[in-house]
Amino acid sequence: MHSFYFWVSLAYMIGRTLAVSLYSAEINDESKKPLEVFRAVSREDWGVEVKRFNEEVTNDTIALSGNKFFFLTRKLVLSVAGTIV
């Protein structure tokens, strides 16, 4: 019974850690969604604020970071998970 509990708990903890990491990496994916709206509107209709926001979304990495040494993106999470498995 102890062995069964150990393996079930381990699988649960690994699954929960992976799920939290993927949900956290979704911040980066969601930050790119305004670009779809910007592309639907012609550039002549943009205001100064929209131009600045477009440049910020395009050029900056919007994600959780580890002291700016790495940014938590879906690519990073999947590559780390791939090297562990």
Image (cartoon, rainbow, N blue to C red):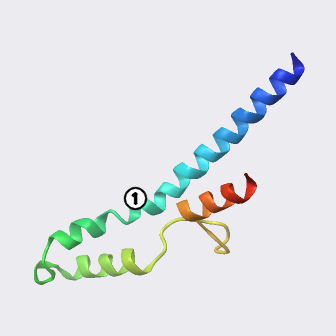
Give the class, few, some or many, for how many residues have Cα within 10 Å of label 1's Cα (few <14, many ≥20): few
Mark 1: secondary structure = helix
Q: Which one is nearer the viewer's eye here, 55 or 12?
A: 12
Q: Is residue 85 above or below residue 66?
A: above
Q: Quadrant of residue 17?
A: top right
The picture places residue 53, in percent across and down from the top left corner, at 31, 76
The answer to whether residue 73 is seen in the rendering is no
Kindly identify the residue that appears in the image at 65 percent across and 39 percent down.
15
Decide if residue 16 is on the left or right side of residue 31: right
Decide if residue 10 is on the left or right side of residue 27: right
The picture places residue 70, in percent across and down from the top left corner, at 64, 71
Q: Is residue 44 above or below residue 11?
A: below
The answer to whether residue 43 is seen in the rendering is yes
Q: Quadrant of residue 57?
A: bottom left
Kindly identify the residue that appears in the image at 67 percent across and 55 percent down.
81
Kindly identify the residue that appears in the image at 70 percent across and 33 percent down.
12
Q: Which one is nearer the viewer's eye here, 50 or 71?
A: 71
Q: Quadrant of the N terminus?
A: top right
Q: Quadrant of residue 38?
A: bottom left
Decide if residue 44 is on the left or right side of residue 33: left
Instruction: In the displayed orientation, state which residue is furthest to the right.
Output: 2
> Disc 1 marks which residue?
30
Kindly identify the residue that appears in the image at 22 percent across and 66 percent down.
37
